[in-house]
Image (cartoon, rainbow, N blue to C red):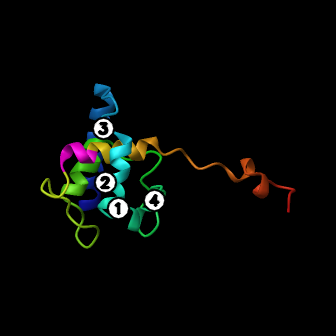
Amino acid sequence: MKILLILAFFSALAFSQAKTGQANPGDPEKGKAIFVKDGCYQCHGYDGHGGVGPRLAPRPPALAALMAYLRHPAPGGMPVYSPKVVSDAELADVWAYLNSIPDVKPAKNIPLLAPGTY
């Protein structure tokens, strides 16, 4: 039940952000530096495609949902990132960085991995 409430909350945040047409706030270059400095890469990978932690890029959750989760993460998961640790503006920069990461190429578009080449 608790999971359903959390999912409903994040879905509502994502819908409200999409409806308002919020532009991409933040600076991707600053966001990349914060992502590395604060150790996000250790669980989510340098490119945000996941690892021990979930995939965040190339389509991260809505900014409001990401901020809400980072401020109050599930118990036993990742650490709390209070505004004293990372500001809302810095989180917007990280979000912009995650949005700037391109999607991975399908294997068929990588010559070495294309069917018939091995």
Which quarter of the rendered picture does the C terminus lie within? bottom right
Q: Is residue 26 left or right of residue 112?
A: left
Q: Name the residue at the left extreme.
A: 84
Q: What amino acid type is highlighted by mark number 2?
A: Ile
Answer yes or no: is residue 54 visible.
yes
What secondary structure is found at the residue carrying circle 4? loop
Residue 111 inside the magenta-drawn segment: no
Magenta region: which residues? 87-91
Q: Residue at x 73, y 47 (%)?
A: 109
What secondary structure is found at the residue carrying circle 2? helix
Relative vertical location of residue 23 with respect to residue 112 in this rendering, above or below: above
To which quarter of the image does residue 25 belong? top left
Question: Residue 12 location in percent, x, y?
Answer: 27, 40
To which quarter of the image does residue 80 belong? bottom left
Tell me, yes or no, whether the two marked residues, 2 and 1, touch with CB atoms within 8 Å.
yes
Q: What amino acid type is highlighted by mark number 4?
A: Tyr
The residue tagged 2 is 34
Relative vertical location of residue 21 with respect to residue 29 in this rendering, above or below: above
The residue tagged 1 is 40
- The first of marks 2 and 1 along the sequence is 2
- Marks 3 and 1 sit apart, C-alpha to C-alpha, by 17 Å
Q: What amino acid type is highlighted by mark number 3?
A: Gly
Number of numbered discs visible in the structure rendering: 4
The residue tagged 4 is 46
Q: Main secondary structure of the magenta part?
A: helix
Relative vertical location of residue 109 with respect to residue 38 in this rendering, above or below: above
What secondary structure is found at the residue carrying circle 1? loop
